[in-house]
Image: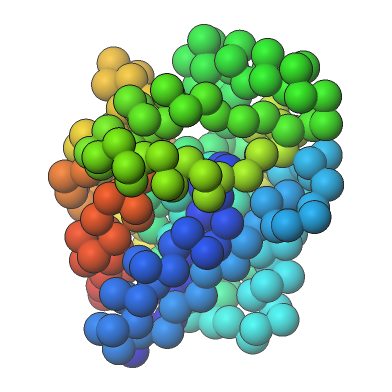
């Protein structure tokens, strides 16, 4: 039995990963799905990246988690990198699932195409509360392009405004991911166009891990909704010894 911690991406909470967690747990593993500070109900949308990372470090301590396979999706890649930098002794393997891989001093905005950053800047200005939202058309066509319209609409209603500051704050690391002794894996969903294929998740971001295990699986950025069982299998393949 292994212990998995699944860390969600922007606009999500841990609840949306429960179907994936259920499949992993059915294979005999312990699974945790925390929600990052800033995405919990009632959280202020002015939360920065350091506080977001700190909330998952705190979760590890409060739940006495050790020997963990730590999985991060999308924005969650920033979080798991920061957690691994702070408490490496608690982690067995890092698994990045179509996730951002930062170097010291990088932000998500630094790793996005400029038109994505401009979209979020406009959203933050219009909303005025420190948060950004994702337009439905982008969600439907770029994030969950492998699902039917009803699934896209239902899952869009589950999303919550995301703290913009976590996307622009630069991460502070003692070691870049490639320098970390922790083993690493990268799950690449091959139909993921949340980032354009000329500016891809893999290998552009994955190669910053240094030595890593690559798991390729058919699906969109939001495979957790469109095929959670398939994603669970990919996560276990990525997390095996």
* 48 to 3, vertically: above or below: above
Q: Residue at x 36, y 76 (%)?
A: 22
Res 129 quadrant in image: top right
Q: Is residue 20 left or right of residue 217?
A: right
* 96 to 5, vertically: above or below: above
Res 165 quadrant in image: top right
- Counting from the top left corner in percent of width and height, residue 3 is at 43, 81
Q: Is residue 190 left or right of residue 10?
A: left
- Counting from the top left corner in percent of width and height, residue 240 is at 26, 72
The coloring applied to the image is rainbow
Q: Is residue 38 left or right of residue 128?
A: left
Q: Residue at x 68, y 66 (%)?
A: 57
Q: Residue at x 73, y 70 (%)?
A: 58
* 204 to 53, vertically: above or below: above
- Counting from the top left corner in percent of width and height, residue 34 is at 59, 67
Res 130 quadrant in image: top right
């Amino acid at each position: 039995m292994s212990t998995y911690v699944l860390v969600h991406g922007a606009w999500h909470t841990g609840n949306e990963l429960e179907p994936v967690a259920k499949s992993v747990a059915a294979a005999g593993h312990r699974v945790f799905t925390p929600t990052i500070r800033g995405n919990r109900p009632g959280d202020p949308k002015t939360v920065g990246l350091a506080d977001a990372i700190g909330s998952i470090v705190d979760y590890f301590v409060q739940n006495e988690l050790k020997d963990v396979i730590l999985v991060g999706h999308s924005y969650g890649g920033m979080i798991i990198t920061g957690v691994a930098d702070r408490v490496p002794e608690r982690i067995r393997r890092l698994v990045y699932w179509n996730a951002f891989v930062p170097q010291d001093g990088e932000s998500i905005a630094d790793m996005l195409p400029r038109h994505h950053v401009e979209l979020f800047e406009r959203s933050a200005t219009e909303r005025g509360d420190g948060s950004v939202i994702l337009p439905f058309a982008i969600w439907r066509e770029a994030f969950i392009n492998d699902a039917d319209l009803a699934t896209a609409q239902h899952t869009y209603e589950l999303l919550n405004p995301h703290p913009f500051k976590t996307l622009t704050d630069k991460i502070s690391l003692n070691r870049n991911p490639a320098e970390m002794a922790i083993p690493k894996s990268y799950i690449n969903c091959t139909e993921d166009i949340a980032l354009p294929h000329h500016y891809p998740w893999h290998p552009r971001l994955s190669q910053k891990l240094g030595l890593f295990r690559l798991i390729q699986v058919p699906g969109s950025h939001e495979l957790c909704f469109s095929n959670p069982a398939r994603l669970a299998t990919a996560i276990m393949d990525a997390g095996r010894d």
